[in-house]
Image: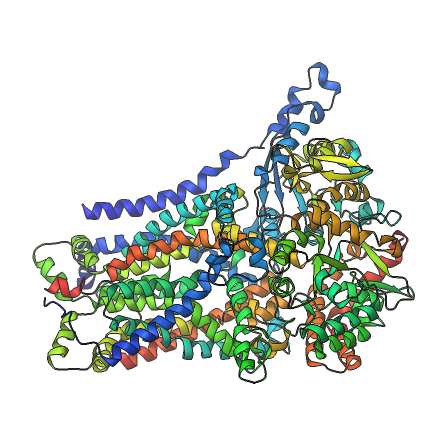
Amino acid sequence: MKKLISLLMAAAMILSLAACSGGTNTSDPASGSGADTSTSGSSSEESSDDPILTGEKPELKILSMYQAYNYEEQPAWKIDEEITGYKTKWYALPADNADQKLLLEISSGADYDVLLRISPNQYAQLSKQNALIDLSGLLDQYGQNIKNAVSDLAWKSVTNDEGVINGMPHEDMVASPDDAYGMLTGGIGVRSDMLEELGMELPTNLEDFTALLKAAKDKYGIAPLTANKTSPFVSVLLAAFGMGDPEWYDIDGTYTHRVKHPQIADYLAYMQELYREGLMDNDMPINTADNSKEKFASGNAIACAPLMFWDIPSMVNALATSNPDCKIEFVTDLAPDADTQPYHYISKGANFVSCISQNSKNPEHVINWLNILTDTDNFRRTYIGEEGVSYELIDGNYYPIFEGDDATNFNAYTNSDKLSGFSDPARAFQMWQARARKTPEMAEAYEAMNSRVDEYEARVSIEAYGKTSPEVQEYITALNQAFSDSFLKAIVENTDPEEAIAAMQADWDANGGLEVEAAMQAFYDTNKDFAK
Amino acid sequence: MAKVKKHKRVTVFDIVNVTVMVLVGLIMLLPILNLVAKAFSSEGNVIAGNVLFWPVEFQTGTIQYVLMTPEFSTSFFVTVTVTIFGTLGAMLLTVMAAYPLSKPHLKGRKFFLYIFVFIMLFSAGMVPNYILFRTLHLTNTIFALIFSGMLSSFNLFLIKNYFETLPEVIEEAARIDGASNMRVFFSVVLPMSLPVLATVTLYYAVGYWSNYFAGVMYITDASLKPLQQYMFDLVTQATSLQDTTGNFSDVSQAMNVSGENIRAATIVVSTIPILCVYPFLQKYFVKGITIGSVKG
Amino acid sequence: MKKKGGTLKYLRQNYDLYLLLVPALVYVLIFHLLPMFGILIAFKDYNMFQVPGNPFLSILESPWAGFKYFEQVFKRPEFLQAFANTLIISVYKIIFTFPLPIIFAVFLNEVRSTKFQKGLQLIVYLPHFLSWVVIYGIFVSFLGSTGVINSIITGMGLEPVSFLMDSTKFRGILVISDAWKEIGWSSIIYFAAIAGLDQECFEAADVDGATRMQKIWYITVPSLLPTIVLMLIIRIGNIMNAGFDQIFVFYNPTVYDVADIIGTYVYRMGLGKLEFSTGTAVGLFNSVISMILVLSSNFIARKATGKGIW
């Protein structure tokens, strides 16, 4: 009997393996339906019409970026379906190893209809391997809305020398330089209660900022500025040294990385001073973001970098536990001194690109689907919902509505941006601001910050479009990592700034930095007109 | 079997020993208490670092929120299913293989053993494994999660070595009574091996519960995302976005970031079930259940 | 002829033993041995799109690269340092954290109350389930310049110590945090082994008037020896794995010189990222070293104790 059992077990194991290997092919939702519609429509009156636009709509298999949430649990998923008439099945890459996973899936023939919102780097890899189809014809035929919504620079970044278009860039929502209201989103957070006690104003230039830190150190005996280990490059402070959030700057026509910026050694010297004098938290190289926020919230620091307006709702509650009246004020990009006008960089770029792999069974339908979602009204509908139900317009500004059912009010649109089509970045930015006004505290801080926007010169950075080229991608991650590591080490060890920077530059040159510079320069020379 | 005398004198040894053990216990327990306290405290107090070992502004809303999240319950169900069926299958494979390998007379034993040593040390890497699972049409099925890590050579050696320590006389006695290999295995060997079987069951169950890599490799369908991957996504999303300095496209996500107490709550909720496995298996660690009792 | 007859007879008598082995062997063949062909990737300029849609042929038809990818990693100036760090950190962990679970299990077993034993077993097993990210958060708040430990140090009038940014202390922190996380988990196997001990020996020793320490030293420890040997050999085989997840979360640029292991180094340089060949080459290198160590330590164990793990 027992023999029989063990025999059966062995057999069952083998059978189950065999069964799994044969069984799953039938569940393919998309197979064949595209072909069917084209033949069935040929004899009827609709024969003059395009079967893609009028015929049966297949279910689309969509592969997109990772999220902690399930796309199909989002209210926007149903709205998409109502608007377009297409059923969609969503798949997501993992958070970890996403690049490898995507390449493995596509190279071994996975038949996703569209790769939605993958990273520019992932897109570049697939494009290099000819794994993507040319979209130019399809866009002409089915994608007029998409063609109009995406900017020329963005299209240029996905078009190769032969005019082949492999991807559709999702441009970052950014303020237009002509109407810069809203471009400031955060910087270094400062506790309003300590600021008042010190009797000082919110600093707008580096001298005042240093003075504030010194005063706070003297009065409270704390390390006044806390920061975390992520990066030694604080854009608010870099702004006082001719830099800012971007990595590349035009220095007399030469597109120059931070590592070779003429003032980088000065910035290092300044950071060393803060660290040495105890003006900056000496745990900075080991702090997590939570650690530094904790120090700030508990009053062990007067300033916290970086802090963004979206940290406000939780930080307000945290500050309230020690002082209910304390608010957060934001130091935004600093001028070097009181006589110089500050500036802020608006970074143009595409954080995501959508594309269609050679394995897709429904490329026409995908473009049609995206095109419908990109229609101006449809975009607004999926992105922030209906006026009077989920948002309202006050003086041309979008505000969220939280009354009513969670399934239809603004809460329903929390993650809807990942299920929307394409839009002009400045227009999307207008609507996006409803999200910045989610709580009264957030709205207040956001508006306080941007009340200073007129004092700023708005500059434009287009580096993001250059950084996707293969020459840059090959080296840039390791180069930036090494630079940032050495820089942090130089701050802590207080090495001579000039020498330290020279060593970092030598390292940069020896490990592919020159190749990267050449590629970025070539990109900049042909595109610099867009950086206006 | 003589009863262990209960009324021994309490010696210095006992006092020192228990004191050290209590200290060790505290060092292990306090950080965990901190995590649990965070899960039950208000978000503001968690961020401000006011929570130590006891909740401040006690609330259960965060735990409720985590439990109500549809993604959590989906992943939880996936992981429970995978752990149960995976552990069952893995135990069958391992125990069945360990018995013949514990017999020195088995012909080809060396060869088989070296195969298991080999797979313990060499792994093909992610590309070939992915290709294999894809060719077998296992990707995006629950079988991918069950079949990956179904046999650990280490566990196999553990059981095999334990079998080898069992006194041969008992098996011989059963054979003389006419029992077959199978009968000896099921009725004599397995009942004597409960402590090691309990240990290995625990190893496999925890292995399946905390297997993060299989989900990353073989699953893109959110309805099959295992719990560990869900938790990783949650934590990554929170940390990576907290660190972005003003990238607009990430802003909308960042505003939706899970707070520190949600993370604590998720860790607590998703760890409790696997913790419960241990006391359940502990009863097999009780002294005297094995060789002694059989002999007696 | 005679011999063959013997074999046949043997097989007839013991075929059921082989049947028991079949499921495991089938599993190993399919899920472990078949994919091994992929090790070729380490010696090829692997391009996964070589034959589009056919990943298997893509591996076979990618051009040979010889030892190019091994050289790429090993010839880097920092590699030797990373290799040395890997070994040093691993050896520290073996020396300091390997004996702890054994000691813990043995002494917990000496506590008379079974309830206390069970409760404490459960408690020490908890930290195993925390991820390194969470544990790092705990350690920073303890060891930071304003953390509990430094408050005590400065309270005694001493200078604060930056534990996580000091090259002389960082490896110690790695060992301690590793011990904290894994003692309980690693001691389970010893609890089980102790549970399997023959009680009669202890009773006999009681009759002879043996002390507690004598009983521990002459009965408990020797009977744990097979388990200890097994665990030690496995641990030594794991020497190239110095704890990537842990170090990746814990380290920072100021301690790279003592903390950078091969895994973190390869990761930071972006070498393994999309270069599957590099990743496979490093993996293969680690496996070969592990194999040498496991085979030789098993050989030594067999010579010394008369019994290896296989």
Q: As drawn, which residue projects farthest toward the left?
A: B177
Is residue B19 in sight in this rendering? yes
Q: Is residue A174 left or right of residue A21?
A: right
Residue A402, image quadrant = top right
Pick the front one: A184 or C309 = A184
* Quarter of the view holding residue A515: bottom right
Looking at this view, name the residue that lies furthest to the top.
A45
Q: Position of residue B8 (x, y in %)?
A: 16, 74
Q: Quadrant of the N terminus of chain A?
A: top left
Q: Is C126 in front, or is A56?
A: C126
Residue B175 left/right relative to A329: left
Return the residue nearer the eye: A55 or A280: A280
Q: Residue at x 47, y 38 (%)?
A: A24
How is the model colour-coded? rainbow
Residue C205, position in %: x, y? Answer: 14, 78
Q: Residue at x 23, y 56 (%)?
A: C17
Q: Is residue A97 visible?
A: no
Q: Is residue B64 left or right of residue A108?
A: left
- Number of marks in picture: 0
Residue A499 drawn at (x, y percent): 78, 82
Would residue C301 appear left or right of B73 to someone viewing this image? left
Residue at point 21%, 48% (across, down): A3
> Image height check: is A181 above or below A502?
above
Q: Is residue C95 above or below residue A198?
A: below
Image location (x, y in percent) of residue A26: 50, 34
